[in-house]
Amino acid sequence: MKGIVFTEFLEMVEEKFGLEVADSIIENSHLPSEGIYTSVGTYEFNEMVSLITNLSKEVKAPVDDLIYAFGLYLFNGLSKAHPEVIQSYSSPLSLIYSIEDHIHLHVKKLYPDAELPTFKILEQTDNSLTMIYSSSRGLYRLAHGLIEKSFEHFNKTATVNFELLNENGTEVKFNIVQDGE
């Protein structure tokens, strides 16, 4: 998993829960990296699992809710790190529609070893999108947060529903309908 995800996660934890909580979850996670991350480094996914699990215990919040909150937070960090990507789009639906064919290609150029989820578009209209999220990591709630934050970024709103296609969340169907103007 790319370091930018770890650095943004720890920034979110510090901002929302305080430096003491951030230090505590790093200490309690017994990480091979010792919690020292660079945005361009690559780290084991299990380190993120440990951090999120320990944050959940520390703040007494469900893991899925924390992952969703991180998706909301991560959008801003990614858009600041790569503003040229977001600026290429005039609407949230066009941004989301282009994840697989444009945004992930851009990410792969920057980070050739990045392991990214896939998004298969099933149906698209002027105000809706149905797609399948697939990832061995099952971070569909992260994707959910990123999707919702993309609408906020463009000053739009939407109804975002998802349906787990398997119980571990590695395949999820998203239905996104942009609210009327």
Image: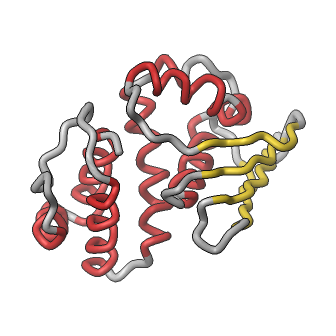
Which residue is located at x 55 percent, y 23 percent? 105
Q: In the displayed structure, would residue 65 be above or below residue 96? A: below
Residue 117 appears in the rendering? yes
From the image, which quarter does the N terminus lie in? Answer: top left
Which residue is located at x 44 percent, y 19 percent? 109
Q: For residue 83, what is the image quadrant?
A: top left
Q: Position of residue 130 (x, y in %)?
A: 80, 47
Camera-nearest residue between 4 and 159: 4
Q: Position of residue 69 (x, y in %)?
A: 45, 60
Q: In the displayed structure, would residue 93 be above or below residue 131? A: above
Camera-nearest residue between 137 and 91: 137
Q: Position of residue 22 (x, y in %)?
A: 18, 62
From the image, which quarter does the C terminus lie in? Answer: top right
Which residue is located at x 26 percent, y 55 percent? 15
Q: Is residue 28 left or right of residue 65?
A: left
Q: Is residue 146 left or right of residue 73?
A: right
Q: Position of residue 121 (x, y in %)?
A: 78, 40
